Amino acid sequence: MLSPSFTRRIRRAILLPALAIVAAGCDEVGSTWSGAGPAPPVDLQVWYYAQAVNLQWELHSGWDGEAFRVYAKRTTDRDYYLVAEVSNCRDGLCSYSDINLSPGRSYEYYVASFDTRSGSETASDFAVEVFVPQPVAPPAPGSIDAVPLDNAIFLTWDDLARSADDFAFYRVYLEGGDGQVVFLGETDSEGFLDLLVENGSTYGYFVTSVDDLGHESGGSALAEGTPRPDFHGEFIYAFEDRPALSGFRFQEAEATDPIVPGASGDRHFRMEVDSEGWWLVPGPGVEVHGEAFATTALRCGPAADAGCTDLRFAPGGGYHQGDLAMTPGYSYVLRVPASGGQWNYGVIRVTHVGFAQDGAIALFDWAFQLQPGNPALSTVGERSAR
């Protein structure tokens, strides 16, 4: 319990439940301490955030290595009680967070420097009252998509959380296969680009929303994505005109040329041209889906137009080894034999067909899924709920 003389040193400052800051006390940081006992803590600041009351104060210039004691009480209580002893100050600042709180109640705090040799204390110039609100978080995002790119995944989700007046930002998490959760970052928009991924591996994500007092919602549904090579502006010649540049093989890296001879046994397809048009001809063991899909882009990523249309999954059936006409504005799905009797799926989107000075050509974009058996070509959406 405080002594009468000590009680008179305490002034009360009221903090609203936000990041309000209390003004500095009478003793400046740079002044000389000439009073009895240890030099007091200076510029005490107290605020509520994320279900904790946070205290911070500065070291007086007369500080001589003393520890500090944090005192608190509910405003309905008569006496203060010792909450903690703090000695780990850095760069002239000390701090403490109190999480032993009851929502819907107000608390008062002050800090005192403590001389272990004499047992004397010197309090801060005032106590601070802070209200602890009920921890009501904004709604969690309701839907989330993971758009695989080349060595990147773009996450996008709905704006349901913005229905809360106190919404502030989102937190993005990565969930590993072993259940380990890794915090990736924060954003105030409904999108996040993860550049710390590798092609051919699957990653799972969820997102939470946070209000302006740090109250965090539960997680969104889980979205999974598998980044894969994604290349644009490839061109190929007709087998009849330049056979050495008429074949194509999906590659794992941009440094490897995907154009191979049209007669190569490891080609995934080659292009042929006749009087009826341009033709995609699958290579040995490779199958093409019998339907070409009308699309506006190979994949609809972060900057895509609202009407963007891509091919998100390889169909489960309908493949054959026959030729297929190549038409600009359409995407074609091929499946390539992989180990264990599985398939690797790839997609090309034809952008132009025509002629160069030395023969017929086709221009196209392409992507290849490195993970055997995974049909994801653009986006893998919600797989399971949290």
Image (cartoon, rainbow, N blue to C red):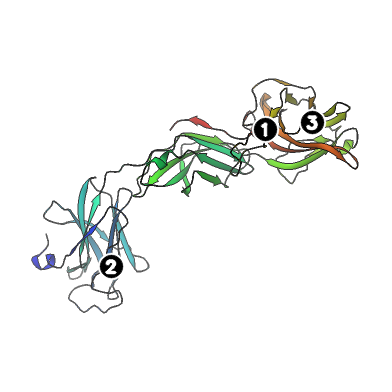
Q: Which residue is mark 3?
A: 269
Residue 354, percent across and down? 84, 37
Using the rendered view, name the quadrant where residue 209 is placed.
top left
> Type of residue at label 3?
Phe
- Mark 2–mark 3 distance (CA, rounded to whole Å): 73 Å
Task: Tell me the amino acid under the disc marked 2.
Answer: Asp
**Is disc 3 in contact with disc 1, using a CB cutoff of under 8 Å?**
no
Kindly identify the amino acid type of the residue bearing the numbered disc 1: Thr
Crowd rating for badge 2 (residues with CA inside 10 Å; few <14, some 14–19, many 20+): many
The numbered disc on residue 295 is 1
- Give x and y (percent) for residue 173: 47, 43
Query: Compared with residue 358, is residue 284 higher up or lower down, i.e. above or below?
Result: above
148 and 71: which is toward the camera: 148
Q: Secondary structure at mark 3?
A: strand
Q: Which residue is mark 2?
A: 43
Q: Nearer the viewer, residue 57 or 209?
A: 209
Can residue 265 be seen here? The reply is no
Identify the secondary structure beneath mark 1: loop
Query: How many angstroms separate mark 2 from mark 1 (CA)?
Result: 62 Å
First of labels 3, 1 by sequence position: 3
Above or below — where is 202 with respect to 38?
above
Residue shown at 12% from the left, 67% from the top:
8
Task: State the SS at label 2.
Answer: strand
> Does 201 sit above or below residue 90?
above
Figure quadrant of the C terminus: top left
Decide: few, some or many residues near mark 3? Use Cα within 10 Å; few <14, some 14-19, many ≥20.
many
Closer to viewer: mark 2 or mark 1: 1
